[in-house]
Image (tube, grey):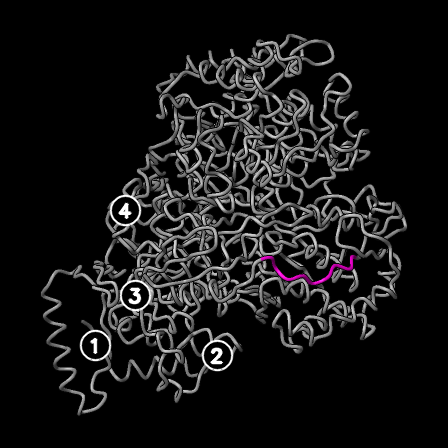
């Protein structure tokens, strides 16, 4: 589009005038005014992929993304990106972008108008509001999560909202809430720069969090000594850099953690002062448990002798001693890292608790360079799913559906009539899809995720989705749009305004930089438009306490904004309005997010963010630590102010070892582990459309141990059948490739929609966090 | 077909001798077959390397149990495994009674030379046919990935893909064994670009394999990447031109502008190592510094 100077000035003047009127910032101003001499503009955004939250600079020319660079000013990545991050801009330009709404008519998805699609959705919701559900994502922006929460929980009085983050970090959440009473980690990435020892608990950051991995390993190039201990069931690229590799049998991590605690207490080398000051002890398998004394705990630990650990975890006593020695060394700074290995675990909550135990007993917590840090897989699993609380049981800001007080606070903050929010928690992800199978739920709106490929045991959990009213908002055709009744084309990443919250509590904001293709529109708008249609159809829940539409926002001059009209929405920054509404929710649990305008200026800020006397806003590197966290009681050193017993202490849990629900047997003699690869993000719908990434990793494979492969006469490239009690698929073998699984186990990545490994996986989940275990089930292997 | 002289081989051994006793070179190389020594296969799955079939050659057994073993494998891999694609490496004149073998192989080599440069590789197991990867001395031309300026990177500033195969997908550190060099290896007539950002060690985090030309697109792409920046500006005809691109992660100008880079951007004076003494970044084209917030808002 050609724009001459006069047109530009006119537009700018118009935009400025409207900004004064509405009190919000029109979005087009940014791209228009920042053009450099070569027609190229650079703006900040967080990367769209993993939970690291790297800052990128996006280069835009003539309304299109032409380049992506690491943001030198962002303290997360300091200019470096991984291969996915560099190519994040390419992922916008797949030729098969969805550009128009599609409605299934006589079995075929046919193009439709937005009005038709929104009306169809609204009519279905109004027909049966209680059996509708929304399945979202840790890739939702924070305002997207806010709008869905208000629509479903505050509007429809329906708590059936759950994200794919349930499959990702739910165990970390319940682990943290049971250990110190509140979600989100205490430490931050700065600790990685200071630690002497990094312990990877079933984690492969070399592929999954590459920039953080570089941040750790490249310290060696500067002459610093960083010891890496890799605990795993599979040798990976991370193992290549590790000083020690400790192999364990699946589920053995529970015994290892208890074994370390046992050795620490037995040798008397635990941090007695820290334990007395900051810990209570608790036993039981559930979230409540019952109190126990330190002596009882020490006695309970006596089961976990090195011999016992060797028996159930396959770890040699010397290896266990090595770990215990590291923790016993009072001068050593230790960071534990974990991600899906511990979270996608039928005892995910327990193992999260146990790793905190190790750090508490050794006092390796809340000190610079020492922390237990749960890495997150998605860009805003923390910011949206956990903080906004887009989970069946949660309300914004760390509140719970089951808590009457919390419901009341939310109703007040949302200006809703009392009693609007349903007291019954909604379904978690697996239960939601079970309910959709059984017909208990009749409709589901899927946004920013691909459950048709990622749910475990796909046959059982998704086979009847086609019969339900399935709405899918996405940017490309996926395994889920294949099942949809209505497909809505969405704007993606920098085609809309957005905010993400990363693993270290850093909230990052960005502005829209390019127009979405065709008729694609923001997810926020889609929900508001559907809500407005429900309002027009007379759904009583769409009215607030004053009888107005729930998404009624006003500009600075008091004029109401009709955000459900696309033209109005486009001209205003709905993100700011939604975030301003959401921010007060974050104060109760002392999340204390920074104001929108501060986030616009910053390269993200780690909450709690408080205003100092001079008016400056200060972020918090380490939570619960005196001198850093503004909410800590002076003189306490470390104050777990949300501790269960309200005494500033965290809980050390006596969680036993428990065998996994399905173990290899004669018919299915192998362990199956699934996961991601460096080049592809989740189901590959974006990254496979990047030519460079697809060429580097064009197809799924099964990794076998070379010894097993030799016995079975399987060579690289051979077709292999992988069969479990639930399903089977064919894949080519890769032996001695990127990783080497332990003997008796195989690994398959899940990015390929033409080879759905989730037909094979098990839907068994952690009873506390409801997170399924994608990392272990029993399979049989045969050469085809 | 290139030959490596005994002296060259001895020099290689010398290079690695501090890591591993020379006697160990006689041991069979686990995980890397002799086939892959002479003609490396495409990486990923298609690299049908079947040698580990024997249980004793299982790599995971012998390696990584201690740091010393890791180093051993590393050296071994280098000598026997990683040669540039398309190149055949043999040791000349090793023993007189092997001459006839060499003769035969040489004849075969000449024959293959006469065939197309991209002669296919037929894998032993599956019988699948893959074209041979190019030598990385050859420039990669726009191909099926042609959504961008060249196929080796998506846009100016994107990390280039690895244009050659690489034995051992796990072992990113080994990239530096060749790419940490400053100069080309003259005897091999190979141009190896030195790393321009030595402080980063996890090479494969950004540089992924792009050598398998048989892989088409998953779906077509419309992306058009930022093009090369063109020439820098000069104050007067005799002044040194400015640097028309960002310099972050480009510490070594000779990585691209040296003898190993593309001819058209090669410096005419590679012996003058202090490039930025005369060539300074062009402020208008230097993207190192993002526009500040005030500028974005049009307040400046």
Q: Can residue A659 be found in the magenta stretch?
A: yes
Mark sitting earlier along the chain (2/4): 2
Residues under labels 2 and 4: Cα distance?
38 Å
Q: Nearer the viewer, mark 2 or mark 4?
A: 4
Q: What residue is rendered at 64% in x and 23% in y? A: A578
For label 4, the residue is: B216
Nearer the observer, B127 or B25? B127
Mark sitting earlier along the chain (4/3): 3
Mark 2 closeness class: few <14, some 14–19, many ≥20 residues within 10 Å: some
Residues under labels 3 and 2: Cα distance?
25 Å
Q: Which residues are magenta?
A: A653-661
Residue A370 shows up from this direction = no
Residue A733 shows up from this direction = yes
The local secondary structure at tag 3 comes to loop
Q: Nearer the viewer, mark 4 or mark 1?
A: 4
Quadrant in which residue B34 is drawn: bottom left
Residues under labels 2 and 1: Cα distance?
29 Å
For label 1, the residue is: B3
Query: Label 1 marks which chain's residue?
Result: B
Q: Is residue A642 above or below residue A730?
A: above
For label 2, the residue is: B69
Query: Do discs 3 and 2 share a chain?
Result: yes
Nearer the observer, A692 or B16? A692
Mark sitting earlier along the chain (1/3): 1
Q: Which mark is residue B48?
A: 3
């Amino acid at each position: 589009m050609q724009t001459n100077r006069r047109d530009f000035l006119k537009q700018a003047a118009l935009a400025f005038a409207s900004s004064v009127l509405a009190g919000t910032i029109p979005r087009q101003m940014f791209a228009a005014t920042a053009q450099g001499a070569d027609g190229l503009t650079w703006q900040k955004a967080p990367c769209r992929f993993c939970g690291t939250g790297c800052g990128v600079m996006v280069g835009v020319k003539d309304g299109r993304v032409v380049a992506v660079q690491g943001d030198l000013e962002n303290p997360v990545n300091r200019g470096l990106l991984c291969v996915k991050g560099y190519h994040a801009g390419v992922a916008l330009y797949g030729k098969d972008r969805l550009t128009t709404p599609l409605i299934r008519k006589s079995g075929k998805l046919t193009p439709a108008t937005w009005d038709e699609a929104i009306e169809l959705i609204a009519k279905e919701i109004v027909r049966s509001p209680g059996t509708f559900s929304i399945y979202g994502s840790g890739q939702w922006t924070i305002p997207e999560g806010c709008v869905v929460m208000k629509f479903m929980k505050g509007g429809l009085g329906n708590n059936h909202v759950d994200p794919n983050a349930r499959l990702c970090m739910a165990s970390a959440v319940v682990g943290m809430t049971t250990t110190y009473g509140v979600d989100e980690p205490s430490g931050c990435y700065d600790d990685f720069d200071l630690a002497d020892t990094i312990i990877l608990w079933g984690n492969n950051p070399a592929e999954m969090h590459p920039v953080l991995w570089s941040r750790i390993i490249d310290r060696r190039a500067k002459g610093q000594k960083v010891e890496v201990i890799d605990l795993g069931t599979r040798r990976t690229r991370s193992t290549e850099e590790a000083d020690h590799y400790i192999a364990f049998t699946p589920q053995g991590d529970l015994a290892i953690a208890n074994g370390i605690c046992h050795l620490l207490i037995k040798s008397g080398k635990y941090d007695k002062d820290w334990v007395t000051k900051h810990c209570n002890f608790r036993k039981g398998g559930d979230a409540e448990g019952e109190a126990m004394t330190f002596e009882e705990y020490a006695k309970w630990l006596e089961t976990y002798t090195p011999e016992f650990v060797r028996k159930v975890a396959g770890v040699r006593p010397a290896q266990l001693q090595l770990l215990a020695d590291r923790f016993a060394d009072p001068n050593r700074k230790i960071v534990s890292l974990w991600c899906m290995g511990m979270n996608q675990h039928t005892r995910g909550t327990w193992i999260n608790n146990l790793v905190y135990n190790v750090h508490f007993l050794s006092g390796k917590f809340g000190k610079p360079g020492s922390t237990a840090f749960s890495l997150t897989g998605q860009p805003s699993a923390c910011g949206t799913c956990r903080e906004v609380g887009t989970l069946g049981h949660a309300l914004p800001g760390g509140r719970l559906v089951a808590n009457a007080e919390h419901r009341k606070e939310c109703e007040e903050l949302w200006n809703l009539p009392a009693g609007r929010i349903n007291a019954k928690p909604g379904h978690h992800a697996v239960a939601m899809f079970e309910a959709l199978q059984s017909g208990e739920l009749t409709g589901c709106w899927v946004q920013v995720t691909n459950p048709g490929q990622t749910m475990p045991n796909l046959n059982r959990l998704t086979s009847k989705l086609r019969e339900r009213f399935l709405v899918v908002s996405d940017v490309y055709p996926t395994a889920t749009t294949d099942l949809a009744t209505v497909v809505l084309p969405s704007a993606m990443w920098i085609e809309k305004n957005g905010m993400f919250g990363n693993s270290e509590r850093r909230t990052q904001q960005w502005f829209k930089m390019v127009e979405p293709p065709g008729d694609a529109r923001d997810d926020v708008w889609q929900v508001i438009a559907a809500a407005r249609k429900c309002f027009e159809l007379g759904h009583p829940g769409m009215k607030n306490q004053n009888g107005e539409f729930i998404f009624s926002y006003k500009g600075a001059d008091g004029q109401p904004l009709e955000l459900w009209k696309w033209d109005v929405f486009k001209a205003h920054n709905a993100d700011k309005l939604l975030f301003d509404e959401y921010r007060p929710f974050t104060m109760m649990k002392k999340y204390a997010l920074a104001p929108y305008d501060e986030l616009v200026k910053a390269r993200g800020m780690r909450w709690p963010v408080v205003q100092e006397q001079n008016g400056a806003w200060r972020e918090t590197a380490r939570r619960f630590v005196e001198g850093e966290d503004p909410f800590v009681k002076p003189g306490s050193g470390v104050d777990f102010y949300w501790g269960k017993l309200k005494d500033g202490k965290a809980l050390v849990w006596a969680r036993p070892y428990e065998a996994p629900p399905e173990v290899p047997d004669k018919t299915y003699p192998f362990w199956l582990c699934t996961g991601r690869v460096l080049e592809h993000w989740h189901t590959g719908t974006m990254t496979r459309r990047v030519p460079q990434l697809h060429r580097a990793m064009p197809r799924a494979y099964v990794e076998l141990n070379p010894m097993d492969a030799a016995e079975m006469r399987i060579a690289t490239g051979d077709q292999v059948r992988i069969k479990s009690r639930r399903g089977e698929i064919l894949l080519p073998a890769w032996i001695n490739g990127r990783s080497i699984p332990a003997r008796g186990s195989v690994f398959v990545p899940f990015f390929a929609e033409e080879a759905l490994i989730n037909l094979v996986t098990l839907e068994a989940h952690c009873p506390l966090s409801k997170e399924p275990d994608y990392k272990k089930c029993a399979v049989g292997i045969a050469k085809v | 077909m290139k030959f490596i002289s005994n002296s060259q081989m001895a020099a290689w051994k010398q290079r690695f001798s501090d890591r591993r006793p020379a006697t160990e070179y006689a041991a069979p190389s686990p995980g890397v077959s002799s086939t892959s020594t002479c003609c490396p296969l495409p990486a990923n799955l298609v690299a049908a390397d079947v040698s580990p079939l024997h249980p004793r050659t299982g790599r995971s057994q012998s390696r990584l149990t201690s740091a010393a073993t890791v180093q051993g494998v590393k050296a071994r891999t280098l000598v026997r495994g990683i040669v540039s694609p398309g190149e055949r490496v043999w040791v000349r004149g090793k023993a007189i009674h092997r001459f006839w073998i060499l003769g035969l192989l040489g004849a075969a080599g000449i024959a293959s030379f006469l065939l197309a440069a991209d002669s296919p590789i037929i894998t032993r197991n599956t019988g699948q046919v893959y074209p041979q990867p190019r030598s990385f001395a050859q420039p990669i031309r726009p191909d099926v990935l042609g959504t961008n300026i060249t196929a080796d990177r998506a846009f100016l500033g994107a990390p280039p893909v690895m244009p050659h195969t690489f034995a051992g997908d796990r072992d990113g550190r080994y990239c530096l064994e060749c790419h940490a060099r400053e100069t080309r290896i003259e005897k091999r007539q190979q141009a190896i670009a030195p790393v321009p950002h030595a402080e980063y060690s996890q090479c494969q985090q950004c540089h992924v394999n792009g050598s398998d030309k048989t892989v088409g697109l998953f779906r077509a792409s419309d992306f058009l990447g930022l093009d090369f920046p063109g020439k820098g500006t000069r104050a007067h005809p005799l002044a040194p031109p400015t640097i028309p691109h960002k310099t972050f992660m480009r510490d070594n100008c000779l990585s691209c502008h040296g003898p190993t880079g593309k001819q058209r951007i090669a410096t005419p004076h590679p012996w003058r190592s202090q490039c930025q003494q005369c060539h300074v970044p062009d402020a208008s084209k230097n993207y190192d510094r993002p526009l500040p917030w005030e500028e974005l808002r049009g307040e400046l």
